[in-house]
Image (tube, rainbow, N blue to C red):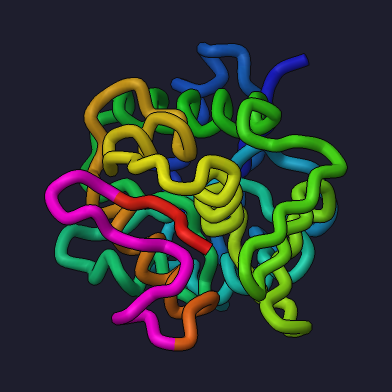
Amino acid sequence: MGKRVLVVDDEKLIVKGIRFSLEQDGMDVDAAYDGEEALALAGENAYDLILLDIMLPKLDGFEVCQRIREFSDVPVVMLTAKGEDMDKILGLEYGADDYITKPFNILEVKARIKAIMRRTSRRGDIHTAGRMIVKGGMTIDCESRRVVIEDREVNLTAKEFDLIELLATNPGKVYSRENLLNIVWGYEYPGDARTVDVHIRRLREKIEKNPSDPKYVHTKWGVGYYFRG
């Protein structure tokens, strides 16, 4: 059965081009041209990925993403104009997984989509069903994908959970940004290492009492990140 993608953009030519290209690869593609339509389709259907433009009529992409996160952890890739603040795109309050800058090469879009889908379909590479990880005051429930710190549940996005689960499962092991891109995002081509930095910073803001002096997720300067509970 083919993967199902929702493409959301008010520029119909862009939607038409993406749809044609993805359907050539055997994917089922639905289209929405404003935020309200996108939200309705996302609530009614199970998608493997949503490609979501930021600038939309009725509801913008940020609000659509935020509302989708209330009921789904489907991978969401934002389409953004050059110059948009990446920290905002992948922000704490929105929960986007990745972003692609316009104007884009359709081959890059397809490669990014396929990489994310591969990563999602093999989540078991990291995920261990039924396992609980307890480190210091943190409890990670790998089955329900919940994190509790000192009796307080922390609301993480799908990518933030994947990061903390991977790092906590391998305490002391230093992962470079490139390694984290490959494992968590599934990229098989050079990705943007800042994607990792932004997600790590957002993760720290949620799980650390003092994000600038972290207890759990540490930086190995010039190398990458590691977990110490």
48 versus 67 height, above or below: above
Start and end of the magenta stretch?
210-224
Describe residue 196's horizontal placement relative to residue 204 as left or right: left
Residue at image point 54% right, 75% down: 207
Q: Does the magenta stretch include residue 203?
A: no
Residue 150 spot, x, y in % from top left: 71, 82
Dominant secondary structure, magenta: loop
Residue 158 spot, x, y in % from top left: 61, 54
Residue at image point 52% right, 41% down: 170
129 versus 89 height, above or below: above
Quarter occupied by residue 155 = bottom right
Describe residue 215's horizontal placement relative to residue 6 as left or right: left
Residue 187 spot, x, y in % from top left: 38, 28
- Most foreground residue, 172 or 52: 172
Q: Is residue 211 magenta?
A: yes
- The answer to whether residue 5 is visible is yes
